[in-house]
Amino acid sequence: RCNVDLNLKDKHLPKFQVPDGETLDSYLQRRAREGLDQRFEEIARTGRRVDADGYRERVERELGVIIKMGFSGYFLIVQDFINWAKRNGIPVGPGRGSGAGSLVAYSLRITDIDPLPYNLLFERFLNPERVSMPDFDIDFCQDRRGEVISYVTEKYGKENVAQIITYGALSAKSAIKDVARVMGVPFAEVNELTRNIPNLIEGHPATIEKALEVEPKLTQIQEQKPVFKAIMEYARALEGLTRSTGMHAAGVVIGEKPLWEYVPLCRGQNGELVTQFAKDEVELAGLVKFDFLGLTTLTVISNAVKLINRGKKAEEHLDIALLPLDDRKTYQLISSGDTAGIFQMESSGFTEMVKKLKPSVFEDIIAAGALYRPGPLDSGMVDIFINRKHGRERVAYPHPKLEAILRDTYGVIVYQEQVMQIAQVLGGYSLGRADLLRRAMGKKKADLMAKERSGFVEGCAKNGVEVKLATDLFDTMEQFAAYSFNKSHSTAYGLITYQTAWLKAHYPLEFMAALLSSEKDNTDKVVAHIAEARTRGITVLQPDVNESDLEFGVSPDPKKPGQQLIRFGLGAIKGVGENAIEATLAARTKPFAGLFDFCARIDTRKINKKVVEALVTAGALDFTGKPRRALFECIEAALQQGASAQKDRESGQFGLFGGGPKAADEAPEERVFGKEEWGERERLALEKQALGFYITGHPLSRYAEDVKRFATHTCASLGTARGFEKVTVAGIVRGWRERLTKTGKKIAFAVLEDLTGARDLVIYDDIIQKYEALLKGDEPVLVRGMVRLAEKFGAEAQQQDAEPSPEIKVDEVSRLADVRAAKATRIELKLSAEQATSDKLVELKTLFGRYPGSCSTTLSIVVAGASETKIALKGTRVAPSDDLLAAVDRLFGSKVAQIR
């Protein structure tokens, strides 16, 4: 017989080494007190005055609780790896979750939020009346999070550190989708079911049973189609079952002994140690979870600050942690709805909310993060808040003592901390007991609530509050507790929101460059960000081996002295790896003169023909002024000459005989200079192949006026379209995917891309039959269809801004050129006096003769400093074809022709 005694009481924290003569408690106290003094110095530099004695008293009170509960070691471990990250230049977030309410954490630099100005409560994080482990969630730069995990693994031993497994369960929607897939029902059809299932019901993930109760339409749909009824029955049986395993996005456990002594372990996909217990079971086994989260926005902020500080003296460097929080320009930017790239605010729903809210103080930004959630939005709480802020509704307080608590939120209970403070001020609760009340309200257990109601009313009576008012207040608190949010978290994330908005308002080029670097692998977002940059008057240029670094950067604009532009990074070019980029930057001791000079100076062992082809087609050698086609065709010769030059360098022949391969350098290039450039379509296609998107032009650019005339929406503006709305959008179709339905019919999915972004298309069999050639033709088309709001699933659906994404169910497709030709009446040419030479005009007449048609033609000649002369070319009628327009533009060396 085997007897096992499981110790589920003790916590197995690793031993943190403290200096000789110190204990964990004394060392924590010393570090916290010294850290607070350093924070005082930083606060003084901002001009803010604080009550130093009040701060010290708060720190001592927090230290007393931490030490009494035995958590000194935990705080020291966390501050150690966070401060290691900061010393090593790894961006760390200002805080996350309730930990931002601790002044000790602020003093130790675990967080960068001073909790006192915002009335953040330590007891919301660590409650002395409910013994449980503190839980700091820490955001690190997404790209360097792994370095911090490596640090703790090295410090505490690789057998003592592991990541945590996750078990993915089938939600209502995912169960329906999986069953539908097995039964051969296309996702596009089953969306009819899933779009009627809310993500949350009463604040909890929706189940099929609950969804059927609250959404009568769901019952009607499944009754109408037998296959839907079968799907729902099978899905209900599978709902909640474990579907998959994965690795926790953030959770890391660190033990005092090898972890196999506490929990079962396995290996992850990359050989890392992973617990076989999920996070709750890991904690039951006495192990402590540390959350190492990755947040891309921290990388964006860090990279933007580096670009801003480049070339500045140290004393002029921007310190993002010391921004003034009353910057008018920042609040104007947010209030105008210019929120693309702004942390938390990018979704169309959030943007619309802040346009109505018009934040004017930092407290408004904190509140915005707490209000933009399903509960407050559905309850009407957001409208009350906005109306009160703007004076359209009277701000009222149920009791005079509540004004100090609710003033910043215009009398609305927005935060969990406010529920706790009301219980403390009126009910006589300690903050620890108030936290228990908050938790009880969240659980909505009738017997528990009856007991708490009685205690609250009794406490209010002792403070002179009438029974009726106390009862009404409890009801109000209970109602808002369901929707209220953690203010500590909202404040910390509000600071990141403010920082990104401030950067965009004051340093738009550096901010956009950093944003583009962070999204360089996401084609749709890069297209949208470039479009936004250009609408702001910011020039975005292709990569350049003389100007570009690894990431997107800011460079002087050669055409506009004193102005700057955004330059693509070499790292954005597909097929150009880090070794090739490092070799390029190492060889760039002075500007490269051309392709042959580039190949002669670079280490040819680190590049190959494919790399140089990608550089050429991406436009990285456009500075030569030579056609890309000409450069492309002499890559092999340039590489051979470069390899020879490298061999000579290594053998020391240059040093012996002097000079270099200059004569040979120029000859091969000269032989191909006469070659014409690829046609625009081919040049742009190769550019997109190299970069993933168009940068020096776009197939739609020539149709800009036509898009305005014929399209009802752009891809970007579809974000505000209503479900079932009829729309017409112009663009290029890409990413065609096709499958067969259970009935043997085709269904296709594709992406429509325009100058502002991209949207998904759904194409059914009958439309495929009619328009397949057009949809696969890789040329500008006009798509007419109906907007459908596609649901998000899995991790995407759990995000705060997980709104349904608009897609288009395609009904009709036309070539944009054909639509334009059918509507066109004339072609206008606008020439400068220098362009309108007699020779050119004779060539123009010959060109027109090659493209006879029905459009009249007019010619405008503009003389600098004088009036414009417009001439109707009588008897000259032409076809409004792309080939004619391209030929005319080539003839005059710029875009001069326009179809009307």
Image (cartoon, grey):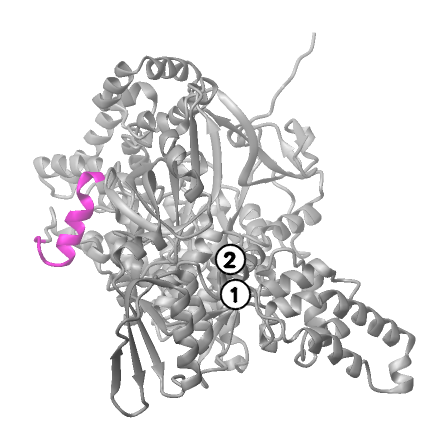
Task: Reply above or below: 566 against 694.
Answer: below
Q: Give the mark count.
A: 2
Q: Answer with left or right where residue 26 lies relative to residue 695.
A: right
Residue in the image at 25% along x and 39% along y: 723
Q: Which quadrant would residue 866 be assigned to in this image?
A: bottom left
Task: Reply above or below: 114 against 898.
Answer: above
Q: Position of residue 847 (x, y in %)?
A: 42, 70
Q: Which residue is mark 2?
A: 518
Task: Reply above or below: 561 against 142.
Answer: below
Please tell me whether mark 2 sits on a helix, a strand or a loop: helix
Task: Reply above or below: 453 against 103.
Answer: above
Mark drawn on residue 303: 1
Q: Quadrant of the N terminus?
A: top right
Residue in the image at 50% along x and 50% along y: 138
- Residue type at mark 1 is Asn
Is label 1 or label 2 in front?
2
Residue 388 in magenta? yes
Q: Which residues are magenta?
A: 378-394
Q: Which quadrant would residue 881 be assigned to in this image?
A: bottom left
Please tell me whether mark 1 sits on a helix, a strand or a loop: helix
